[in-house]
Each structure stands twice: as structure tokens, then as C-alpha cells.
């Protein structure tokens, strides 16, 4: 039953990530929480790939790592710009999408 | 027996010269010139007049050749051995040539004696039996100078079938042929038309030089000439109608040549519309004749039907009256003459052409063409009074009187034309056929000279025709114009030995009233009219000549003699005015009489053929000639001395009639009547057109208001009611309701949803995860 351990671990990691995204006001911490969520998904993919003797899971995991790197790059740039404009990286204040 | 005899004699018959088969080329050349000018002149950068002059010159030469051939043909026919057979080459080709000649056996010495005429020869190709019976009375054909026993050849007809209707039957129509008819009358007019037209063309190159529509002008001049030639050569009544209308259209175009000015286009319209009145008469008359003569359009056949009594006298009378209406409009006879003076609005050379050779002589020509019909219809033989003679008489006196009160030189000449046309109609009305035709011939020459002379004068006086304001004393400045004008005036006034004298004298003799003249009847009233006109003509022409050429110059221009292209035609025409009269001197005239006496008559007047009535010829009378000339000279002298006296009182005065007239109420009334042209224009435009216009307008207004507007209003009210209903219930309640409801719904839902959109990213994330959790819950429960 070694699959369950990975799934439990991934679920915990995911929940921590979601909690971080929903509660942190610091933009950088939000980004880091998103990394947690993505890595939880990676663990799931690798675990299922190993369990099913299928390389596709690992390939997907590699893709996500690459996309996550890009996402962090973009995300940090956004945070940096928000900081430049507002002298603050509090995401609660960034409500310009209000209709 | 007779048939065989005639068949052998047919070999001796004179066949018409081949040139007669080609006369159709004459109008064709002019028509081609019209087309060339229209389509080529500007493109090839050639002046339009070269086409016109070349064409009309060729036509003139051709016409002279035709005339020469005709003269030869007439003399061959007259001097032929015996009775010649008719229609011997009838079957020669599909173009049939009917040629025949025969005698007219009235060798009686007394012209006035009637009833002794031998049967005439039919010129018709068909029904040879009839022909033989008719021509079975051979007689002497010697060219007797006094005896009148002569025979003319039949008109040479060349026709092609246009519509073959299978011949006249009970239910079917006659074949419609077009072609040419060559006889003395048409040959005479061919020469006159091409001659005058040639001179007018040459004259125009200077007169309308630099005109804004020079090409257009020459194109229509060509078409005008072509139409007239086509009309003159017509072989059927239908063709005549076509030519008649063509001439009318061309005159419309030329009178209105300077249409930018309102009076000119009005004058053109007036000419056209007045002619339309007469055209109805022409159509009705020709239709009557078509049926009365047994369904034929052939001019010869209709005339023959009239002389042989196929057309009853009453039918002929009705047809003649209808045709007379046409003549009245076209030839400017009294009551329908009003367009003719207004036609002066056109360029002067056109006036010359209209008044001398084309347009207005078409009416007189029509009488000559259908002379048998008129002769029978009006009972010219032995009568004292008939519609044609009276209309002619009224016209020549009425037109002449109007000429006295005109200030405009061209209008004097226009009324003079009216008056002289009246003379021609009078002559034909009293049976003096040759006199009428001869007057047409001479008048064409001297009237063209007068008109062109007037044009030359106005050319020198800033294009004014006002004799009182802008002329006077011009004889010193323009001697050539002056002398040619004087010669033509003398010819018009009937001064011997100029052209007008001979023709006018023949007409007066033809009335048959003067002792020793004979003639067809005792036409007292026309004779008196003719005599009065002889005096009036001399008087008003003297007035015009004085005002134009004598006294002191009253205008402000610098008058000068016109150029060669203007004066040469004048000199040619003046020479013509001198010699033309000698073509038809009386046979009793010493020296000349026995040589060239009645030459014109022998060429032009048909004798001894059935398509022409047997008319009696009046003898010339010296006493009549002296009296008529004396009357003219006296009247001219009276006017002359009046102006001479006036000149002595005031060298610059144009007239002092006004004082005179103011003092005498009768004169004043007459003067007012003349100045207002007998109130005919008022009658036509005011009373006739006005009254018809009035009730037609009222009826149309009523119909418009009550019927048309009723319908329109009803439809409008109904539509409005339906519209209001639709607005209220369908549009406002239904459609607008749905639209408003959807708008309100969208607005309300928007108001609700906008609260969700806070712009806070974390809130969105909460919603997203919450929603995902809910979905997961649903899947788990559901699966």
C-alpha cells in the first residue's frame, strides 16, 4: 500500500498550498503556495506513473515543472510591478478587476 | 382590231429617257449629305457647308439634266406621228414605266368654249381595254400656236413595292408603293428647289458664319431640301404625307435655330402646331380619296378617278375641303397664316428657303398635284365662286394689308409671301393652273432675292430688321443690294417686263372676267381681290423700299456693302427675276409670242391625259395688262409721293401716319385691327386655346380633387388608422414590452451579479475552490 502514502502526502501538501493562497496577503507567499499546489500535483502524477509502470506520469510532471518555472517568473514580475506602483505587495489591495 | 393597231403603234411611242429612272437620286443625295454632315463633318474637320454645297450643286445639275430630258420628251410626244399607245413597256420590269401620249382633240379656236373636249387618255397601266377605248380618237398633234391642240406625255412613274398587300380587294388594302413621279410640275419644282437651295447654301456660308451651331444648321438645310425634293417627287399620296411632315419638322428645327431665345422657340412651336391643324385635314382628305378612288394611293389613279367621275362630285368636294385645310396651314392661307410671319425668327437664308422654294409652296404644289380632285370638287369649271378662290382672294388682300403696318423688313416680306401665296391659290381656284404654277415659279425667284436682300441689309445694320429705327438711305452704302432689291421689288409689284408682271397678269386674265379673256368661269370676286392686291403689293413694297433705302440713315451702325458670297446670289436671283417672266409670254405677244409663247405652259401643264382636268385657257388681254400695271404704278406712286413729302418736312422722320390716324376714327380702327393682326393670335391663344384650356383644366381639377384625391385621402386615412392601432397594441404593448422586459431583466441580473465581482483575487480563488469542492462533493455523491 505504498501508493496511499504518496496520495496522503500530496493531499496534505495541496491543502497547505490552498490555505497559503487563500490566507496570505503577501504576493510572494501566494506564489510560493501555488508552487506547493503544483508540486502536490507532481507527486500525484509521479506516484500514479510508478504505480502503473507508465512513463507518461513522469513526463507530465516534467512539463509541469517547466510551466511552473515560467509561471513563477511571470508571477514574480507581476508582483515586482505591483510593488513598484504601490510600494506594497499586499494582494488584498490589488482589486482593480472590480466591475 | 384597235388593240392590234395600237400594238403596232407602240413601237413608235416615245419611251421616257433613262434619266427619269434615276431621279430618286436627287433627294437621296441631299439625304446623304445630311447624314455625312451629321456624322463626318466634325470628325473629318471639314466645314459642313462643303458637303451641303456639293450635294445641292450636284442635285441642281441633275435637275437641269432632268428638265432638259423632260423638255425633249414633251416635244417628242407632241411631234410624234399619231396617237401613241399607252403603257407599252408596262411589263418591262418590276419597276413599271407607264408612258403614253395621246392627243387632246379640242382644236377649237375659242378657248372658252366648253364641252367639246375629246376623251383624254388614261395613263394607268392596268385596264388596258379602257385605255384603248379612251384613246381611240386619234387627232392632229400639230403644235398649233393658237389652237392649243397639243398632247403631253404621261407622268413617268417609277415605283418599287414597299408593302405588297396583294392588290386592292374588298377586305384587303392596296399595295403601298414608293417611287418617283416625273412630270412638268415636279420637274419645274425640282429645278426651283435645287436652284434656290444652292444659292441659299452659298449665301449662308457668310451669313451664319461663326454661328454656334453651324454644322447643325447646314445639316438641317440639307435635310430640308431633301424632304422637299422627296415630297415633290412623290408618286403616291402616302409618300406625299411623309414628305409633307418631313418638311414641317425641318422647318421647325430651322425656325427655332436660335432656340435659346424664347420668342424663337415659340415661333418654331407655333409653326409646327399650326401646321398640325392642317395636317389633320391632309390625313382625312387623303383617306377619303383612298377609299373614293377604289383603294389606291396612286396620285395618277386618284386624279383619273376624279376626272372620270369614279369619285362623285360631293365626295370630291369634301376631300377638297379637307385638303384645303392642309393647304391653308402649309401655304399660309388666311386664318392659318399666323405662323408664317413668326417664322421670321429663323435665320434669314432659311426664311428665303421656306418662303420661296420649300415649305410654303408645298401647299400650292399639293393643289397642283391633286388638281383634278379640286377641279371637280369645287366645280371650278364654269363657276363664279368657290372656297379655294375665295380663300386665296382673302389671303392676298388680308396679307397685303398687314404688310403696311410692319416695322420689320422681313415681316413685310413675310406678309407679302402670304399675299402672293394667296394669289397662287386664287389662280388655281379660278382654274388658271399654269398661271398659278408660273407665279409659284417666278415668285420663288424674286422672293428669294428679296429675302436674301433683306438679310444683306440687316447684315450691314447690326442684324436689325427694324426699318424705322435702323435703316433708311442705304442705297448709297450698298448699291448692289439696293439694285437687286429694286429689281425684285419691281418683279413683285408686277412692273413689265419683270417676272411678276407676266405671272400676275396671267392670273388676272385667268379669272375670266375681263372682256375677251375667256377662262373657266366668271370669277368676279377673286378678280377684284386680285386687282386690289396688285395695287397693295406695289404700295407696301414702295413703302418698304423707301424706309430701307431712301431718306436719311436713321441707325447707328456703319452700313457697308456685303461680301461676295452675299451679293452674288442676289445678282443671280435679280437676273432671274428679269428673265423668268419670258418663259411664259402670251402667244399673242408680238415677236416673242410666236417663238416662245406659252413655253412654260407646254412644259408644265399636262394636256390630253386623264389624270388632269381639261381646263380652258384664258387669253391674255393687253387692256387688262395695262390697267393692272397702271393700278400698281399708281398705288406705288401715291406711297412714293407721300414719303417724298414727309421727307421734305422732316429728313429723319420714318412715318407720320400716327397723326393722320389719330385724326380719323375709321383709319384708327383699321390701323388698330392691322397692328393686332386681325386679332387672330388673340383668337387662337386667348379664346380658342384659352376656353378649351379653361374647362379642360376645371374638369381635370375636379377629377383630381374628387376622384384622385378621394382615393388618395381614403387610402391615407385607412393607413393612418391601421398605423395607430398597430402602434398602440402591437408596437407599444407587444414589441416594446418584450424589449423593455429583456432590458430590465438584464439590468436587474447585472445589479445582482456586480456585487460578486469585487476585484479581489483571493475572493475569486475562494469562490473557485469552493465551487470545485462543491463539484467534487456532487460527483462523489452522484457516482
Image (spheres, coloured by chain):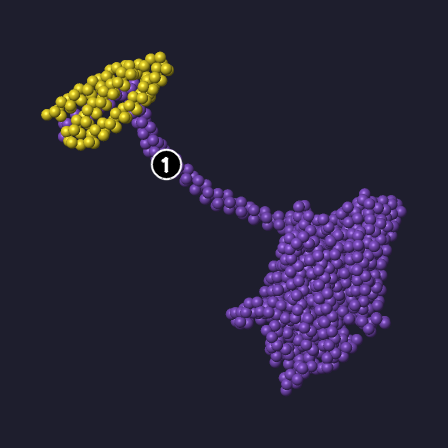
Q: Residue furthest left?
A: A1
Q: Residue furthest right?
A: B648
Mark 1 surroundings within 10 Å by alpha-carbon count, few (fewer than 14), some (14 through 19), many (20 or more): some
Where is residue B545 drawn, in percent x and y?
A: 82, 53
Residue extending farthest top: A87
Quarter residue B327 falls in: bottom right
Quadrant into which the C terminus of chain B falls: top left
Give coordinates of residue B44: x percent, y percent.
66, 54
The quadrant in which the N terminus of chain B is found is bottom right
**Chain A on-screen colour:** yellow
x, y percentage for residue B227? 65, 60
Chain that is purple in the image: B
Q: Helix, strand, or loop for circle 1?
A: helix
Is any part of residue B292 visible from this angle?
no
Give the residue displayed 51% in from the left and 46% down from the top.
B703
Q: Nearer the viewer, residue B280 or B29?
A: B29
Name the residue at 59% across, 66% down. B288
Which residue has dot 1 on it?
A: B726
The answer to whether B501 is drawn above or below residue B464 in the figure is: below
Residue B462 shows in the view: yes
Which residue is at 66% across, 81% downward? B10
- Residue at (19% x, 27% y) in the render: A45
Q: Quadrant of residue B57?
A: bottom right
**Dot 1: chain letter:** B
Camera-side residue of B318 and B4: B4
Left or right of B699 on screen, residue B603 = right
Q: Residue B664's x, y, as percent? A: 80, 47
Q: Nearer the viewer, residue B199 or B491?
A: B199
Q: Quadrant of residue A87?
A: top left
**Vertical placement of residue B470 versus B774, above or below:** below
Amino acid at each position: 500500500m505504498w501508493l496511499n502514502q504518496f496520495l496522503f502526502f500530496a493531499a496534505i501538501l495541496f491543502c497547505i498550498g490552498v490555505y497559503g493562497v487563500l490566507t496570505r496577503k503577501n504576493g510572494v507567499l501566494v506564489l510560493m503556495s501555488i508552487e506547493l499546489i503544483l508540486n502536490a500535483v507532481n507527486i500525484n502524477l509521479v506516484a500514479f506513473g510508478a504505480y502503473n509502470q507508465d512513463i507518461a506520469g513522469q513526463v507530465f510532471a516534467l512539463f509541469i515543472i517547466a510551466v511552473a518555472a515560467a509561471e513563477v517568473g511571470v508571477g514574480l514580475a507581476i508582483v515586482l510591478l505591483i510593488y513598484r506602483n504601490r510600494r506594497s505587495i499586499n494582494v488584498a489591495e490589488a482589486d482593480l478587476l472590480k466591475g | 382590231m384597235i388593240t392590234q393597231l395600237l400594238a403596232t403603234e407602240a413601237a413608235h411611242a416615245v419611251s421616257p429617257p433613262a434619266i427619269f429612272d434615276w431621279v430618286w437620286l436627287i433627294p437621296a443625295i441631299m439625304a446623304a449629305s445630311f447624314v455625312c454632315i451629321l456624322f463626318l463633318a466634325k470628325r473629318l474637320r471639314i466645314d459642313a457647308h462643303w458637303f451641303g454645297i456639293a450635294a445641292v450643286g450636284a442635285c441642281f445639275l441633275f435637275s437641269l439634266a432632268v428638265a432638259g430630258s423632260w423638255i425633249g420628251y414633251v416635244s417628242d410626244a407632241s411631234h410624234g406621228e399619231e396617237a401613241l399607245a399607252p403603257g407599252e413597256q408596262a411589263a418591262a420590269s418590276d419597276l413599271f414605266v407607264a408612258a403614253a401620249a395621246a392627243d387632246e382633240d379640242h382644236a377649237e379656236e375659242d378657248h372658252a368654249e366648253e364641252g367639246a373636249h375629246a376623251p383624254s387618255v388614261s395613263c394607268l397601266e392596268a385596264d388596258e381595254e379602257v385605255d384603248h377605248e379612251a384613246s381611240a380618237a386619234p387627232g392632229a398633234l400639230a403644235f398649233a400656236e393658237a389652237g392649243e391642240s397639243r398632247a403631253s406625255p404621261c407622268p413617268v412613274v417609277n415605283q418599287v413595292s414597299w408593302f405588297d398587300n396583294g392588290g386592292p380587294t374588298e377586305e384587303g388594302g392596296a399595295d403601298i408603293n414608293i417611287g418617283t413621279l416625273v412630270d412638268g410640275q415636279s420637274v419645274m419644282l425640282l429645278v426651283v428647289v435645287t436652284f434656290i437651295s444652292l444659292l441659299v447654301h452659298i449665301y449662308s456660308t457668310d451669313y451664319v458664319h461663326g454661328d454656334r451651331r453651324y454644322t447643325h444648321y447646314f445639316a438641317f438645310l440639307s435635310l430640308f431640301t431633301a424632304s422637299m425634293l422627296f415630297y415633290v417627287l412623290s408618286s403616291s399620296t402616302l409618300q406625299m404625307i411623309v414628305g409633307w411632315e418631313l418638311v414641317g419638322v425641318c422647318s421647325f428645327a430651322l425656325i427655332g435655330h436660335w432656340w435659346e431665345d424664347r420668342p424663337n422657340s415659340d415661333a418654331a412651336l407655333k409653326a409646327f402646331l399650326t401646321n398640325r391643324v392642317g395636317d389633320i385635314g391632309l390625313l382625312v382628305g387623303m383617306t377619303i380619296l383612298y377609299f373614293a378612288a377604289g383603294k389606291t394611293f396612286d396620285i395618277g389613279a386618284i386624279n383619273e378617278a376624279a376626272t372620270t367621275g369614279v369619285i362623285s362630285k360631293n365626295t370630291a368636294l369634301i376631300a377638297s375641303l379637307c385638303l384645303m385645310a392642309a393647304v391653308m396651314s402649309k401655304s399660309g392661307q388666311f386664318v392659318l397664316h399666323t405662323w408664317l410671319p413668326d417664322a421670321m425668327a429663323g435665320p434669314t437664308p432659311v426664311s428665303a428657303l421656306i418662303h420661296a422654294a420649300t415649305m410654303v409652296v408645298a401647299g400650292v404644289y399639293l393643289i397642283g398635284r391633286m388638281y383634278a380632285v379640286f377641279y371637280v370638287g369645287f366645280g371650278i369649271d364654269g363657276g363664279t365662286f368657290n372656297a379655294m378662290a375665295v380663300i386665296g382672294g382673302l389671303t392676298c388682300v388680308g396679307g397685303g394689308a398687314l404688310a403696311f403696318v410692319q416695322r420689320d423688313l422681313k415681316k413685310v416680306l413675310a406678309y407679302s409671301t402670304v399675299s402672293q401665296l394667296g394669289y397662287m391659290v386664287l389662280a388655281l381656284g379660278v382654274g388658271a393652273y399654269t398661271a398659278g404654277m408660273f407665279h409659284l415659279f417666278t415668285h420663288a425667284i424674286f422672293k428669294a432675292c428679296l429675302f436674301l436682300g433683306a438679310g444683306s441689309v440687316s447684315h450691314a445694320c447690326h442684324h436689325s430688321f427694324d426699318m424705322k429705327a435702323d435703316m433708311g438711305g442705304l442705297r448709297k452704302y450698298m448699291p448692289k443690294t439696293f439694285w437687286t432689291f429694286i429689281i425684285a421689288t419691281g418683279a413683285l409689284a408686277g412692273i413689265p417686263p419683270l417676272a411678276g408682271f407676266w405671272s400676275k397678269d396671267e392670273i388676272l386674265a385667268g379669272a375670266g372676267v375681263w372682256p375677251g379673256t375667256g377662262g373657266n368661269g366668271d370669277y368676279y370676286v377673286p378678280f377684284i381681290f386680285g386687282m386690289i392686291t396688285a395695287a397693295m403689293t406695289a404700295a407696301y413694297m414702295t413703302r418698304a423700299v423707301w424706309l430701307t433705302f431712301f431718306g436719311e440713315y436713321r441707325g447707328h451702325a456703319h452700313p457697308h456693302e456685303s461680301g461676295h458670297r452675299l451679293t452674288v446670289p442676289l445678282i443671280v436671283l435679280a437676273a432671274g427675276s428679269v428673265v423668268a417672266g419670258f418663259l411664259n409670254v402670251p402667244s399673242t405677244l408680238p415677236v416673242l409670242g410666236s417663238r416662245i409663247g406659252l413655253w412654260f405652259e407646254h412644259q408644265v401643264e399636262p394636256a390630253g391625259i386623264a389624270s388632269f382636268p381639261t381646263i380652258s385657257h384664258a387669253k391674255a388681254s393687253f387692256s387688262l395688262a395695262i390697267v393692272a400695271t397702271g393700278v400698281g404704278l399708281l398705288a406705288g406712286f401715291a406711297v412714293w409721293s407721300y414719303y417724298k413729302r414727309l421727307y421734305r418736312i422732316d429728313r429723319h422722320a420714318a412715318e407720320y401716319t400716327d397723326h393722320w390716324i389719330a385724326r380719323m376714327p375709321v383709319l384708327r380702327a383699321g390701323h388698330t385691327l392691322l397692328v393686332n393682326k386681325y386679332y387672330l393670335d388673340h383668337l387662337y391663344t386667348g379664346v380658342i386655346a384659352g376656353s378649351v384650356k379653361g374647362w379642360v383644366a376645371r374638369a381635370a381639377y375636379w377629377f383630381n380633387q374628387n376622384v384622385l384625391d378621394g382615393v388618395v385621402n381614403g387610402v391615407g386615412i385607412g393607413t393612418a388608422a391601421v398605423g395607430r392601432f398597430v402602434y398602440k397594441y402591437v408596437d407599444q404593448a407587444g414589441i416594446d414590452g418584450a424589449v423593455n422586459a429583456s432590458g430590465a431583466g438584464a439590468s436587474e441580473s447585472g445589479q445582482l451579479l456586480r456585487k460578486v465581482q469585487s476585484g479581489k483575487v483571493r475572493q475569486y480563488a475562494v469562490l473557485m475552490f469552493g465551487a470545485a469542492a462543491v463539484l467534487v462533493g456532487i460527483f462523489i455523491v452522484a457516482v
